[in-house]
């Protein structure tokens, strides 16, 4: 049996090398056939890389033999599991045949099949590592935990490879498909029904918001799809981090160790230790503020990361950066509405499936509230971030235009002279930092204001109750109304103003990074 396993592994490795060669040479296929590319072996690994790969494979084989009975590797044991696996691989093979027939003789004949295979392989590896961490007891060993999470991080980064927009979108879409399948395959029919209805309901605001903001600036469908999928995937690191902190996992890297902590507990610890003079009520309020600011930091940085590694190669103007950042935010909100069981799926269960008669009024009001207010918070925060990302990305042409018009930048010039940093670099980093801080504050401040009534004595629900009087005009104004108007009406106005700025509409084209190598005379 072991001999058959080794032979099968070698055959799979040979096949994977061919897949990898095709995936990494997608751009070259447009000018050169795959057979010619493979003949040159442009991506044949070095001997050192092969030895390291063999070593890593040996470690993973040892882990699979030790923990194989409890990890996801055991899912391939048994006739039913083998039949299911054979069915999946058979469907993939049929997809490859269809792809070959459909695109025969054309330059795009390999693209989508390789992207699907690549996304499938990376996703299965990531899911296997995730199950090994959380279901096999590996989390009790900090050294294995560190190894597993390092592999997850490397695999995650690999999903955002240097490909064209359709290929990236196909890889990310494949990841989302397999993750959704892994989550839903054991659900009951009632759960699947609730999820399907929730997904359809969540798609309606997605279409409306995308139509509204895509009307401001023309964008390719492949780039929009890529940004939306990337936004959905930006929820994954947050969910993963929450699971790590919930389990109290520890990562030991021999020289140092990492113990992820819940931002709620660290916020409380920070306030009680650093701000000891506060009253109990003020301490609770400040703790809540710090907690939600940290939530804003985590969510907005995750959205910035996927925007940077998925879409920045397709920026041609500041409007592009803003628009794609907004699409990322819409994708994040869509995934959040489905993943959180108290949101759209909870609305379907509570108001449509559980009651004797569907309560469409309550369901509609809940869906509209989430779709308008909460989505707008994400759109505003990440849209403003996208504006500053665009300023940072096009720092060089922007500064040239401003200097040509006679506009000086004394602060940037001063930093340039004092620290010997390029003016463009100073400007770019300043704009990026400004955008990140603005997004963090906009997001965290809204969450804090909405949650404030829950931590105040008496749980005031109106402006009048907050001021000590429920009667009169102020008593009829909900506390949620003020931030709702500011973030929806004011936020929409702000984004439209930014879209209409002339410098934001200007097409700068693609930014190409170049490297210059200077040789020196050793004899001089």
Image: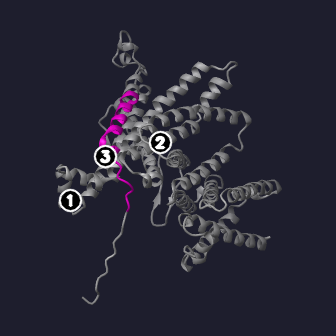
Residue reaching furthest to the front: 105
Point out residue 136 in the picture as x, y percentages from the top left corner.
66, 55
Point out residue 5 in the picture as x, y percentages from the top left corner.
75, 69
Give the mark nearer the N terminus: 3 vs 1: 1
Q: For the residues carrying marks 2 and 3, which lies nearer the camera in this image?
A: 2
Q: Which residue is mark 1?
A: 416
Residue drawn 64% across and 32% down? 197
- Give whichever of 419, 211 is nearer the camera: 211
| One can see residue 272 in this view | no
Residue reaching furthest to the right: 79
Residue drawn 52% across and 44% down? 228
Q: Which residues are magenta?
A: 487-512
Q: Which residue is mark 3?
A: 434
Give the mark nearer the N terminus: 2 vs 3: 2
Q: Main secondary structure of the magenta part?
A: helix
Q: How is the image coloured?
A: one colour
Residue reaching furthest to the top: 472
| One can see residue 444 in this view | yes
Q: Give the crowd class for mark 3: few <14, some 14-19, many >=20 residues within 10 Å.
A: some
Point out residue 89 in the picture as x, y percentages from the top left corner.
73, 58
């Amino acid at each position: 049996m072991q001999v058959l396993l080794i032979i099968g592994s070698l055959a799979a490795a040979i096949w994977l090398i061919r897949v990898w060669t095709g995936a990494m040479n997608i751009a070259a296929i447009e000018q050169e056939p795959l057979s010619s590319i493979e003949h040159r072996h442009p991506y044949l690994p070095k001997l050192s890389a092969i030895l390291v790969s063999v070593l890593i494979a040996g470690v993973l084989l040892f882990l699979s033999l030790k923990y194989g009975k409890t990890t996801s590797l055991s899912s391939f044991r048994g006739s039913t599991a083998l039949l299911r696996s054979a069915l999946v691989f058979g469907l993939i093979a049929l997809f490859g045949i269809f792809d070959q027939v459909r695109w025969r003789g054309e330059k795009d004949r390999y693209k989508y099949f390789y992207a699907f295979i690549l996304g499938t392989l990376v996703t299965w590896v990531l899911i296997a590592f995730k199950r090994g961490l959380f279901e096999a007891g590996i989390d009790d060993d900090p050294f294995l935990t560190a190894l597993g999470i390092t592999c997850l991080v490397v695999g995650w980064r690999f999903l955002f490879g240097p490909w064209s927009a359709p290929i990236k979108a196909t890889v990310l879409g494949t990841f989302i498909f397999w993750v959704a399948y892994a989550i839903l395959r054991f659900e009951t029919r009632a759960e699947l029904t609730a999820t399907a209805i929730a997904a359809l309901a969540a798609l309606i605001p997605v279409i409306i918001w995308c139509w509204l903001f895509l009307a401001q600036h023309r964008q390719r469908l492949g780039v929009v799809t890529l940004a939306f999928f990337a936004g959905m995937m930006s929820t994954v690191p947050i969910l993963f981090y929450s699971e790590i902190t919930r389990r109290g996992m520890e990562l030991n890297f021999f020289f140092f160790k990492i113990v992820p902590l819940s931002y709620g507990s660290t916020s409380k610890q920070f306030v009680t230790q650093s701000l000891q003079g506060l009253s109990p009520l003020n301490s609770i309020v400040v703790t809540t503020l710090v907690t939600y600011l940290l939530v804003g930091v985590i969510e907005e940085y995750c959205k910035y990361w996927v925007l940077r590694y998925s879409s920045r190669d397709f920026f041609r103007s500041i409007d592009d950066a803003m628009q794609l950042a907004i699409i990322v935010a819409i994708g994040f909100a869509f995934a959040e509405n489905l993943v959180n069981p108290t949101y759209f799926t909870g609305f379907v269960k509570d108001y449509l499936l559980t009651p004797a008669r569907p309560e469409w009024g309550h369901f509609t009001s809940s869906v509209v509230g989430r779709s308008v207010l909460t989505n707008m918070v994400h759109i505003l925060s990440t849209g403003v971030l996208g504006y500053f990302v665009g300023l940072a990305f096009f720092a060089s042409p922007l500064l040239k235009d401003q200097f040509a018009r006679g506009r000086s930048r004394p602060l940037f010039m001063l930093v340039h002279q004092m620290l010997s940093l390029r003016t463009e670099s100073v400007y770019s980093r300043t704009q990026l930092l400004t955008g990140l801080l603005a997004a963090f504050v906009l997001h965290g401040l809204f969450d804090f204001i909405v949650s404030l009534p829950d931590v105040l004595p008496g749980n005031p629900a109106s402006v009048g109750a907050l001021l000590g009087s429920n009667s009169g005009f102020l008593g009829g104004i909900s506390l949620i109304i003020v931030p709702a108007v500011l973030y929806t009406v004011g936020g929409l106005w702000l984004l439209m103003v930014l879209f209409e700025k002339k410098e934001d509409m200007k097409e700068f084209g693609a930014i190409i990074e170049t490297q210059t190598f200077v040789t020196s005379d050793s004899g001089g």
